[in-house]
Amino acid sequence: MPVERLKTDICIIGAGAGGLVVAAVASQLGIDTILIERDKMGGDCLNYGCVPSKALLAAAHAAETIRSAGRFGLNAGALDIDGHKVFAHVQGAIEAIAPHDSVERFEDYGVKVILGEGKFTGPREVTVGDQVITARRIVVATGSGPFVPPIPGLVETPHFTNETVFEQTDIADHLIVLGGGPIGIELAQAHRQLGAKVT
């Protein structure tokens, strides 16, 4: 397979929030830009963080508002939560925003988008498959991934990370949240308001 050699002013590895901002600004300034993404455009914020957690919280807050309506003299009756529809709402929020972070949008900006895993193969050189990119500047905006702590038995136990929890199709009966960062707190609050027992 022949190697394709590309030269650019700036090569960005990672199409999450940081990488997309750099790519958008660089391209608007007329800087020749290549953007590399190995997974999903939009990174954590769009796919596993900000967007789905806020969509889940919106549904949870609506449930809590209905549940507490009695204090205003409003009887809303028994609350019936359809977990399938809640998580369809979450996926719908992701799908609504995804076009803003899409390959097509960034190509319209003049950015060359390459889907695949970028590896440094020399000074100012990144290789993705059979493409070798030489860039004056390289921005590493790869973000991070979930950490599953080495707790005995955890790997064998069904569990979620921030990258899988929004793929649920129903509300868990009981959720144990490890970690008190923003996403952990949001997930705990949302699941509790949607009727799950949370520890």
Image (spheres, rainbow, N blue to C red):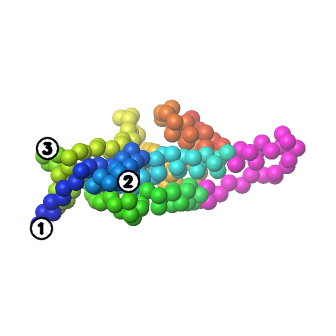
Instruction: Answer above or below: position of 86 versus 162.
Output: below
Q: Is residue 71 magenta?
A: yes
Residue 173 shows in the view:
no
Residue named by callout 1: 1
How much space separates mark 2 and mark 3, taking CA atoms?
Answer: 26 Å
Residue 4 shows in the view:
yes
Q: Which residues are magenta?
A: 62-86
For numbered disc 1, what is the local secondary structure?
loop
Q: Nearer the viewer, mark 2 or mark 3?
A: 2
**Label 2 sits on what residue type?**
Gln
Residue named by callout 3: 123
Residue named by callout 2: 28
For numbered disc 2, what is the local secondary structure?
helix
- Tag 3 and tag 1, C-beta contact below 8 Å: no
**Label 1 sits on what residue type?**
Met
Q: Is residue 190 left or right of residue 115?
A: right
- Tag 2 and tag 3, C-beta contact below 8 Å: no
How much space separates mark 2 and mark 1, taking CA atoms?
Answer: 34 Å
Q: Nearer the viewer, mark 2 or mark 1?
A: 2
User: Which residue corresponds to the image point at 85% horizontal and 49% vertical from the top-left?
Assistant: 75
In primary-sequence order, the first of circles 3 and 1 is 1
Determine the residue located farthest toward the top in the rendered image.
180
